[in-house]
Image (cartoon, grey):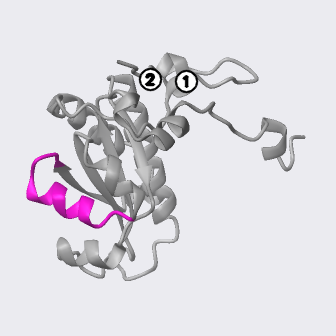
Amino acid sequence: MSLTLASDRAAETSTPIHPVLAERFSPRAYDTSEPIDETKLTAALEAARWSPSAANTQPWRFIVARRGTPEFDAITANLMGFNQFWAVNAGALIVGLTRRVDAEGKPMRWAQYDLGQALAHFSVQAHHDGLHVHQMGGVLVDDLRSAFDVSDDFEILSVTAVGVLGDVDDLPENTRERERAPRQRLPLDELLLVNA
């Protein structure tokens, strides 16, 4: 058995950061023998709920589906290509949506940013509690919209897999290599356009 442990994947940073952030990574190997822990899932959703948003508009919405339900199957059927193969093993899949306009009909310019913050809070809380998250943009948006009868008031942006870390050896060989590859990021100084 060859589990990939979060501590094995810790980021190499220029200065220490919180271990939950340093050890967070996006796995593709999930343990199918473990159902999603409802308390931990709820805590991650609460963390998303309490994330900041522009003018406290809270434009994010979620479709949450646990493995073994028709809703989970509908989400996996609308993932693109390779994502379908591994995401079926996650404990739950979460569709991330945003409202397009506010109560007055004005476009919500920051809605996508706010959803990103909500999902970041979700992933940090989940990782803190021993769950692992992998976010995907490769989704068939129109088909997913139809599957859940999502109104045009909402924009579907992503699907997030969440569950207990599984055995990397259960993945196909080419995927195992990707899963074990060192994590990489651009150096910090390349990201700072101005640092006065």
> Is 73 above or below relative to 105?
above
- With 36 as the anchor, is 104 left or right in this view? right
* Label 1: element kind: helix
The answer to whether the residue labelled 1 contacts the one labelled 2, judged by CB atoms less than 8 Å apart, is: yes
Residue 195: x and y in percent read 86, 41
Residue 72 belongs to the span the image colors magenta: yes
Checking the image for residue 131, the label placed there is none
Q: Which residue sits at x=30%, y=82%?
A: 152
- With 109 as the anchor, is 168 left or right in this view? left
Checking the image for residue 9, the label placed there is 1
Residue 33: x and y in percent read 17, 29
Question: Which region shows up in magenta?
Answer: 66-80
Question: What's under tag 1, amino acid-wise?
Answer: Arg
Q: Which residue sits at x=38%, y=23%?
A: 128
> Is 131 above or below relative to 185?
above
Name the N-terminal-most of marks 1 and 2.
Answer: 2
Residue 37: x and y in percent read 18, 30
CA neighbours of label 2 inside 10 A, class few (<14), some (14 to 19), many (20+): some
Q: Residue furthest right?
A: 196
Which of these two is toward me, 3 or 60? Answer: 3
Checking the image for residue 4, the label placed there is 2
Residue 127: x and y in percent read 39, 28
Which of these two is toward me, 168 or 191? Answer: 168
* Label 2: element kind: loop
